Amino acid sequence: MNPLRPLLYRVAKRWIAGSSRVDAIKAAKEANAKGMAALLNYLGEGLREARSIDEALSEYEGLQRAIAELGLRAHISVKPTQLGLLLSEQALLLRLERLAEAARQRGQLLWIDMEQGQYVDGTLRAYSSLLEKGFTNVGLALQANLRRTEKDLGGLLDKRPRIRLVKGAYPTPPPEGFSSRAEVARNYERLMELLFEARAFVAIATHDARLVLRGIELAQRNGAEFELQFLRGIREDLKAWAVRQGYIVAEYIPYGQSWYEYSMRRLRENRKNIWLLIRSLFGG
Ligand code: FDA
């Protein structure tokens, strides 16, 4: 085990709700009380054993039931490699369909996260199948740091997708990715233009205030539907502002025991977090 793990956990706590479903429900209630919907993610990825994949599936099913019973404004957000993509695309699709159907019956959404570049094709095919089967309640994350995303988007736009646009949490060097943060931001803007011109439903999922404002401007200009999505533990000021403005806002809330990979991505994406880590060394 990484000896730094306990220290990392002290920092990671701000980004995750806790280890159990009870913690997730509590965090969802808090988000609702602040005027935000909750997007609940049961942490886990890269699963290869049918047993652990089905354990994740039944956790999500339990969560969908709890959300409905408690009347929460909440939805689930899942990772393809948590639900069978490493077994086969068919294995993933079967499980996604089950969750999409259960969500549809309860008036909930199913969000699908996007993972590393090698999983994009399989994830896109699964999402397209769900759209073709009439699941209008399913949304997909697309990553602005990948050059291919503009083309991928082109293949989805006439299917009336729901897209969560993110910068991308998985470092991808050229030629597949862009070489600078500025290029990623420019591509994010370009993808928003395409999405809003096509009047697709867009979840603007970034804490980059300039892009949030630009997205709102584009949506309003095109009369398109949108919402703002943020991660738990980041830019509370921006979230509060967005709620005050009356926008539809959702907070992505991960929970579960497998907090390490997710937290490492959060830690890496902002240099200031190194200071949090150093402070935690001294008990701060
Ligand atoms: P950027 O990194 O430029 O940050 C803008 C500002 O936000 C920073 O200046 C800082 O103030 C603050 N900030 C951002 N990240 C921070 C951090 N870790 N710690 C402290 N402050 C931070 N990615 C992916 O590949 N697949 C997916 O499915 C998803 N899903 C997803 C859902 C939702 C709701 C969100 C908001 C994001 C994702 N992401 C994602 C993650 C996304 O790709 C990206 O890694 C993070 O959002 C950070 O990038 P920003 O767009 O916020 O910009």
Image (tube, rainbow, N blue to C red):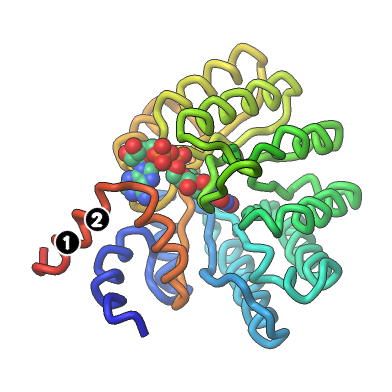
Is 274 displayed left or right of 64 in the figure? left
Dot 1 lies on which element? helix
Q: Residue at x 83, y 53 (%)?
A: 125
Q: Which residue is mark 2?
A: 274
Is 18 displayed left or right of 168 in the figure? left
Residue 274, image x, y percentages: 24, 55
Q: Distance of mark 2 from mark 1, alpha carbons? A: 6 Å
Is 193 displayed left or right of 241 in the figure? right
Q: Residue at x 57, y 40 (%)?
A: 145
Residue 71, image x, y percentages: 55, 58
Three-letter amino acid code at the position of disc 2: Ile
Residue 239 seen from this side: no
Q: Quadrant of the N terminus?
A: bottom left
Q: Which residue is mark 1?
A: 278
Residue 169 seen from this side: yes
Q: Residue furthest top?
A: 221
Corner quadrant of residue 149: top right
Q: Residues within 10 Å of mark 1 (few under 14, many from 20)?
A: some
Label 2 close to label 1 by CB (< 8 Å)? yes
Viewer-closest of 247 and 190: 190
Figure quarter occupied by ligand 1:
top left
